[in-house]
Structures are given as structure tokens and as C-alpha cells.
Amino acid sequence: MNRDRRLVRALGRLADRVDSARIASGNAHRPGVVARSWASLKLVVCSLLAPPAIVVVAWRAAANHLRAKRVMEGLAEFIGRLDGTSASSRLGRITTLDAATPLVITSDLHRCIAGRLDLVGAQDDRALYVAMLDWYGAQGLTLIENGDVEDFWMVGGSTWGAVYDILRLSGAALVGRLGDELRQATYAEHLDRIVSNNRAVYQRITEHFGNHGRYFRTIGNHDDVYEDGRLVNALARYVGGLRMSSWIVLRNDSHVEAVITHGNVADGWNAPGRATLGKLSSWIADMVRDAPIPVTPDDLAPPARTRELLGGRRRNGLKRVNQRFGASSSYDSLDEELLFDALGGAATVGPWILMGHTHFPVLQPASDTGARWWRYANSGHGLGSGLITAIEWPGDEPAPRAPRLVAWVWGDHPEWAELVAGSPPTTHSEGRPVARVELMPTPGGRRLVTARRGSGRRMEHAVQGQ
Ligand SMILES: [Mn+2]
């Protein structure tokens, strides 16, 4: 073990001791005095720097949005050339899988350390995901976690979270071998803590998928540290084995049926290698949450959002962002409407595009114009309130295959229990009922409804879609 790793580990142990004491006193979700003081210090420095910084950020945001649009324009051609024969490209590594492989694709799980950053715990989604992994594992499916899986961007929220922030900033400031070693040590130590906070999840991934060569990952923005193969090796030790790439191509003979990617490639704020603005906005959000000021913005979806999805009231549309700065008031920075136009619009042939990143599950969504994006699905995310959405790829069905969009929810939650009560629970986790609900677009495509409600329309929809 090198000197940096020893130093970072010692600091980590010290931070853990402070955190355990706070957790033992029943304050797990408070950041604690170290994180609060560090956030206050950052707040003071940032306030002084804010006036000039805002100008620079606005300029960079406008420039990056133009760049994202140029990337989008080249994307149709790039995807057209993904024939499953090459293993790398200027847009990252490519993995090819047989399209006859049954898959489950999750994304945007944002697994994090204990404390305030533990959004998975706050949303009661950990045991729910374990139930999903057990259920899909028992069927021999292959698991693809499509980006933003472990979160290396969120900082603070606990003593270790503050120490991690300081070490990460130091690593970024140092050049050459010194900086490289410190960064590696810091990320490896952070990964350790993410794994121990999600022990059951990593156990299931290893047991059902990693040990059998059935675990694949793509790189998102919050886990862009995996551009470095050494951290992929560190992760491999916790999951039995995996393959990390930026693109996964589902191929059937010489025909590409689907392309799986996180989606940040066409995002001005979060594109691979050009994500400074995205990282900065995430960092500022965490600073504000830890600082002792009476503003604690909480952007986690409430139970009402889960109810909305299960009640058939969720929009099945595309996201728009501000055309000058490439972002929206709800912190989105990928313009799906532009991407839809760039990728050839309402075609009913060509590969399916399966993405995450937007945190907005959709299947064959309707554009603003009413035109349908027939070959697009987004898996949504793993941070709903008692809700995780996912895509299933029915590889065992004959071609032409089409992805299914599903929602996994607790069957006993008072806010929506009656909406899933019609059918028996799919499985159980920790003694609680868990339901798998299939989501379908309405005939016009503007909303998502559960398959039970939409079953009468299913044939009509399938005919329209082909
Ligand atoms: Mn993302």
C-alpha cells in the first residue's frame, strides 16, 4: 500500500469514528459539526467569488450547450456505425452483447455513503433493489447498471463526506504523480464506504450476476472516475467481475437491435471529459444543504410522485432545456427534444436507444409536436419514494424485440397500496410485499399507464409501433 493510500485510510478511519458516534446518538441524517463548518467556510469563499464566477459559468454554459448540439448532430452517424464489430471509439469503449440475451437495465441508482448523502436509504429503496436483484437473478437475467451507479460527485453530509471533499479538491489541485496517487487513494476509499453502506446490494450483484459473467456497466457522469481502469479493478473486487464501457450494443447477426448508453454524451453540463459545470452545480447544492442556513432544498421525489406514476398520471414526454444556457429550472441539462430531432425523429426502424440520466422514465414518448419517438426508452432512476424504475429487454422472445418499462414498488405503502393491490405481490423482501408493475404509453403516447389498466390498448399500441 502506498503512502497516499495509508494517509487517506487513516483520515478515513478518524472520520468514521466521528460519524459512528453521531449515528449512535440518533443523528445519522445530520451532517455533523465538521461537515457543517466545512460547508460554512466554502459558503463564505463562494459568496466572495460569486459575482465574477457567475459570468464565467454563464459563458461556459452557453458555449457547452452549443457543443452539445454539435455532438447531437454527429450522433446519428455514430450510432449508425455501431455495428458491434469495434471495441472502442472516440466516444468511449463499446461492448457488444447478443440481442438474444434477456436483460434488466437499471440506471441512476446514486448509491452513496451513510449519512445525509444516503438517498437510497432515505427513499427506502435498498431492500427493494435487493428484491429486484433476487428476482431477476433467479431467472438468469443479465444485469446492466447504466451509469450514475456509485456517486462520486456528491460530497459532505457526514464527516467522511467532508474529508472526501477536501481530499478530492487537493487531488484536483496537485499535478503529476502526486495528484494521481492521491486521487486514486481518495476514490478507492470512497468506494469502500459506498459498498459497506450497500452491502446487501453488492452481495446480490456478486452472487447472481458478477460471478457468472452477467454484470455490465456503463459510465455515467457521477461515476466518471471509471474512465480510469484502476478504479474499475477496485470495483471488480466487490462484484465478482464486470465489464465497464460507455456503449453497449445489442446485436443479432449483423443487425443492431439496441444501443444502451447513460445519456450524458449529449449534455452540455455533464458530457464525458467536459463535466466541470455539472460537478460544480452538484458541489454547490451539497454545500448549501450542509451549511447552517435555513434553506435545505430537498429534491427527492415524494410519495405523491410514486402515486402519480402508478395512477397513470405521469407524462410520457421529452425534456426541454433553456436554449441559451442548456439547463432548466429543475436542473436538467439534456435536451431530449433536440436529441429526438438529431437522431432522425419518428422513425420506426433502426436500433432502439435505451438511456438513463434524465431521471424520467419514458417508453416511446410523445414529443412537443405530438410525434412519437418510437425507438426510445429511458429507465428513469432508483431514487423514487419506494420506487425503482427499470427497462427489461426480452432477449428470449423472437425478434423484432421491444423493451418493456417497469416500476418496482413496495406493495404495502399507504400512499399507493390500493393501486397495486389487484394482483398478488411479485415477491417479498424483509417480509414486505414487492410489486413489479409494467408501464405502457397511452395510445397517443402522452402518458404512462400501468399494463393492467392499459392491457386493452396493448395490441393497438403494438400495431402502431411497428
Ligand atoms: Mn447522469
Image (tube, grey):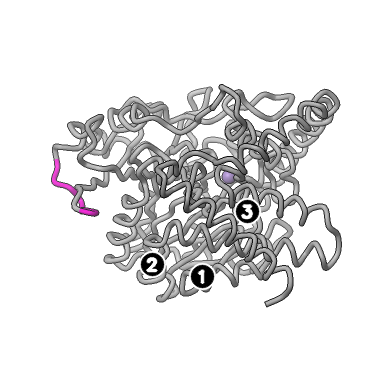
Amino acid at pointer 1 = Leu
Please check the rendered image and state whether residue 194 is part of the magenta-colored stretch, yes or no.
no
Secondary structure type for disc 1: loop
Q: Nearer the viewer, mark 3 or mark 1?
A: 1
Indicate the position of residue 288 as horizontal and vertical percent values: 62, 31
Disc number placed over residue 80 in the picture, else none: 3
Q: Measuring 37% from the left and 61% from the top, which residue is drawn there?
A: 200
Disc number placed over residue 155 in the picture, else none: none
Indicate the position of residue 283 as horizontal and vertical percent values: 66, 39
Amino acid at pointer 2 = Gln
Amino acid at pointer 3 = Gly
Along the viewing direction, whichever of 306 and 170 lies nearer the viewer: 170
Q: CA distance from mark 1 to mark 2?
A: 14 Å
Crowding around mark 1 (Cα neighbors within 10 Å: few <14, some 14 to 19, many 20+) is many
Mark 1, residue position:
242
Magenta part, dominant SS: loop
Residue extent of the magenta highlight: 423-430
Q: CA distance from mark 2 to mark 3?
A: 38 Å
Quadrant that contains the N terminus: bottom right
Along the viewing direction, whichever of 448 and 108 lies nearer the viewer: 108
Mark 2, residue position:
203
Q: Quadrant of residue 461?
A: top left
Indicate the position of residue 350 as horizontal and vertical percent values: 52, 50
> Can residue 341 be spotted in the picture?
no
